[in-house]
Image (cartoon, rainbow, N blue to C red):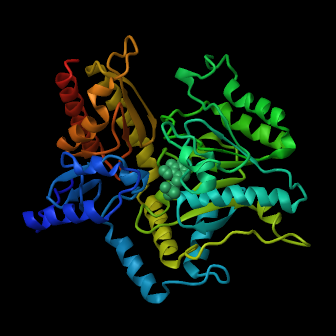
Amino acid sequence: MKQPLGDTGLGATEVQDYIDRGLRHLWIHTQQQDDLARDDQFLVIESGEGIYLRDTQGRRYIDGMSGLWVVAAGHGRTELAEVVRRQTEQLAYANPFAYASAPAVDLATKLADIAPPSISKAFFVNSGSDAVETAIRMAKQWHYNRGDAKRFKVISRFGSYHGMTQGALSVNMANGLNRAPFEPLMPGSLHVPNVMCDRCPYEKTYPECDVFCARTIEDTIKAEQPETIAAIIAEPISTSNGCYAPPPEYWQTLREICDRHGILLIADEVIDAFGRTGRWFGIDHYAPVEPDFMTVAKGLTSGYAPLAAVLTSERVADGFRGGPKEAFVGGITFGAHPVACAVALANVEIIERERLVENAERTGAYLGAQLKELQSRHRVVSDTRGIGLMHTLEMKRDPETGEEFRPEDGLRERMPVLLREQGILSRAAASIAIAPPLVINREEIDELVDGLDRAIGTLESDLGLA
Ligand SMILES: Cc1ncc(COP(=O)(O)O)c(C=O)c1O
């Protein structure tokens, strides 16, 4: 077992000062600012090691969601800190609109090596949203360059998260996301039901359904006129939609529909890629299916620097070279940042050398089994699902009748606190995201599941549901 992280060396006054100034000056993403001021909600994270984080008060937590599905290689890697130092000294920046840097070339080469065979080119940007935005624009301009200028529509699925910039938000249909303040969003954003076999939106049953949820996307395409559709975007295995791994034929069917109608297929791998699902990429579970674009971020650097990429094929790149074809209208000042690229390469090499993809598959199967056992011990746990080290645990007031928790049960406020009391940080309400760093071992999984067990037990007794 890893050593507990030691004292922070901060006194009570300094700890409080960080909290006070943080609440006054720092805008935490997506959180309602009043919520943070309540009940000791404002945590200042001070350091990390392996799967653990420590806050300024010296409390230790398991990083139950790898930050935001980011820290694949675990916290506190001095090897990656050394890469940052070396590359910063040698070359911190090169104009990505004009030049390459050695780390960018090396990383692009490595990604081409591990990605599916037809994927051979990387366009580096700064975030998953940037990558989605770029892939959408690349798809549109690819059609435009071929004289197919009417193709501007993009299809995405209900429940899928794809990011927060304008184009990404237009295809982002995550549950509970309020897009109304930003409307009108990108014209031509079309949305179709997602794949979730045990609660099929079409009330069908697999395998008799013959993946109707995929097949019927073609009806939307026909109704909208195929020659107006630029791309379909989907995560190979969606986290935001509840970790339902689609049946094997799902992606094959999407690929066939795209090919029949000249549509480009974007696999949003921002969470899935770099081992999270127990394969290098989520789409690898559906080989030999290959998308036209893969958007990657998060695990690409394990969070040691911000970097994302659109990975694509020679076929797509060919649409931007030769004759009168226009260069891609897209570029970003910090794209292909040499330090971020050097860190990403070293991170991918760590994942490879330490066999973290295999660990995610093996230890993830153990985690899945432990969660099922936990479910059998708790009345309120209605389901646990997942693949690799990407799981979700769902709770209901009464799983037998399907009764959901009531607003007055206060799950959104209560559950994160109950988890923190057990030394676990994660996104939690009626469902809990469980996605620890890929370095986790069985002993640490046991610690994580024991903590979940106690937190859920406390919830049940507090609400009289035991
Ligand atoms: C599938 C998917 N795509 C895109 C994004 C956006 O990435 P970012 O937050 O880095 O912009 C996310 C973020 O969680 C994601 O899960």
Measured as percent of width and height from the top left, residue 385 is found at 44, 31
Regarding residue 275, the answer to whether it shows in the image is no
Image quadrant assignment for residue 401? top left
Measured as percent of width and height from the top left, residue 41 is found at 23, 49
Measured as percent of width and height from the top left, residue 336 is found at 57, 73
Apparent side of residue 356 relative to residue 254 in the rendered image (left or right): left
Q: Residue furthest bottom?
A: 90
**Residue drawn at x 56%, y 28% as measured from the top left:** 196
Where is 150 relative to 311, above or below? Answer: above
Which of 89 and 151 lies nearest the eye of the viewer?
Answer: 151
Which of 192 and 182 lies nearest the eye of the viewer?
Answer: 182
Apparent side of residue 40 relative to residue 309 in the rendered image (left or right): left
Quick one: quadrant of the C terminus? top left
Regarding residue 217, the answer to whether it shows in the image is yes
Apparent side of residue 456 relative to residue 120 in the rendered image (left or right): left
Where is 132 relative to 106, above or below? Answer: above
Measured as percent of width and height from the top left, residue 59 is found at 16, 54
**Residue drawn at x 54%, y 52% as measured from the top left:** 163
**Residue drawn at x 63%, y 46% as measured from the top left:** 171
Q: How many numbered marks does the figure carry?
A: 0
**Residue drawn at x 20%, y 62% as measured from the top left:** 20
Image quadrant assignment for residue 108? bottom right
Where is 126 relative to 59, above or below? Answer: below
